[in-house]
Image: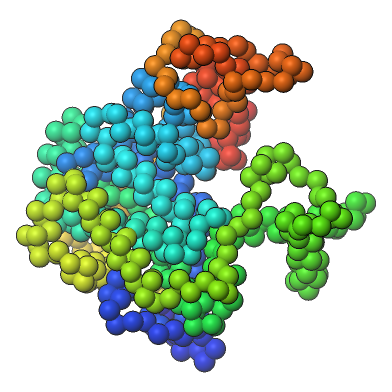
Amino acid sequence: ATLPNIKLDAYKDSFRVSIPEEWNWYFLGDNHLFLCFQDATHLCTKLRNRLLSRTAHMLIGNRCICIDYLSALIRNTPKLRHGLVKSDIFPQDRQNFSSCVKICSDDVISCLNNIKDSEGIIMYLRLLRSIMIAYIDKLTTPLDRLYHAWFSVFINRLWYIWIDNMKKIDLDKSLHELTGIISNQKYTKKKQFFITNNAYYCIEINAHQLTYLALLVIEKKLPLEALNIYLFSSQTCEGMFRSARSMSGTFSSIVNFSVQEFLNRVQKLSLLYKIKTESEFGSSHNTIVFPKHHKQSKQWKQPTRVTEGNNELNLETMTQIIKQAYNDATELLYSFDTEKLFYEKKLTTIKQVNNCMKDMLRKRINIQDYSELNQQYETSGSEDGSDISLSSESYTDSEDQVYNEHPYETSTVSSDQVFDDLSESQFSGMRLFDTVRPELAKSYFEVEINQKRKYLHKQTACWILTENKPISSNDRLVRVRQR
């Protein structure tokens, strides 16, 4: 990456790695001054917002990707099976990451398999989940991160190429046959059938930066701890800054500090976290016990890291795992009746597909260089009148422009047949047990599921019998409106 007036790859202290020639799927160069990761949490919420959009109608092959399948799942399937509520599939809260985790869970995907023509939404949820596994999950191994990162990239590349080579009239016809929606030929473009440009670029950038980072580790230019990319997020940085501010005295009114003071506080925090980690996982009985919230104590696990004796991370294994990701993505996309088009366009190998995508990216990316001041940019006033360009921006990029200004209020549903048609013996993440201690019996209801007596916590019962979550949104603007 470079600019006409600032050569970012020309610095003598920039990173340099050797890129294998057969890596035709890797589009970045071998010299970089710095690495840029897009925040994975925000990327997941962008993909969720696109799914819940009222202006975009994503389409892949002979399947449509929309929230109608999730709505049908909530209406017709007991909540104990999938764990979703109505507020999870309505876009009032654009920053609701917990909803992203819920809608792509194993339980939801398993229930969607029983709904007709839901293969498209399942593919999209697999894409969302792969991004979480690659960049957010702490326990993912480096090779698994590479697999899921490039699996999401290849899914989007094949999807993009298919839409770009399809005629707009054929896409509109397929959309009408699947959903009954008649699109406006004048104002809609191919952009509505794909994810936003912003989200697609984020997926490409993160996968390339992760691969470059792995190469730096392989060549011993960065330590093994650099592969803990779940720390490369704005939430982690904000949490460290809050911890640094909290180190001020109780009676001190000065909460800000200089850069030097911040570095001194970070060193203290580093020592504190080291003691905390050693005390948590140490075998000695004379350890320091730090107070923790009960939810953090349940989720606290020792993260998986690459050890010195692990020889799996090398160029050969990286190449093999990424080819496997391409084969899996191709098999998944071909299941949507898209194989014929790729054979007609002679895009059947990994080299042909990635060379095609590389040429398309070169045509669609325009660089504006702001490295010189007082530079005037000419605005293009010519329009070719075409409405079929996939790379052009349209109103569908703002997928959440239209909202219902009246937030959904909490409502209750009848408890009749709530526990019918349940065959599971265990329910993940729910306080539903076979036995409880006598001193806690007042906090539970006795229920009968599959002719077996179980104990359901009262808070869980309230959650089952409500359709929405009566809590404040994570979005500040939405919280103000709710109040």
Residue at the outermost left position: 344
Residue at the outermost bottom position: 12
At horizontal 43% and vertical 10% (from top left) the residue drawn is 417
Q: Quadrant of residue 170?
A: top left
Residue 375, image x, y percentages? 42, 77
Judge whether 311 appears above or below 92 on screen: below
Residue 407 in sight from this viewpoint: no
Judge whether 106 appears above or below 300 on screen: above
At horizontal 47% and vertical 51% (from top left) the residue drawn is 132
Q: Nearer the viewer, residue 94 or 105?
A: 105
Would residue 452 be found to the left or right of residue 242 on screen? left
At horizontal 70% and vertical 59% (from top left) the residue drawn is 240
Would residue 296 be found to the left or right of residue 217 on screen? right
At horizontal 52% and vertical 19% (from top left) the residue drawn is 464
Residue 373, image x, y percentages? 48, 78
Residue 111 in sight from this viewpoint: yes
Judge whether 155 appears above or below 356 on screen: above
Q: How many marks?
A: 0
Residue 35, image x, y percentages? 50, 73
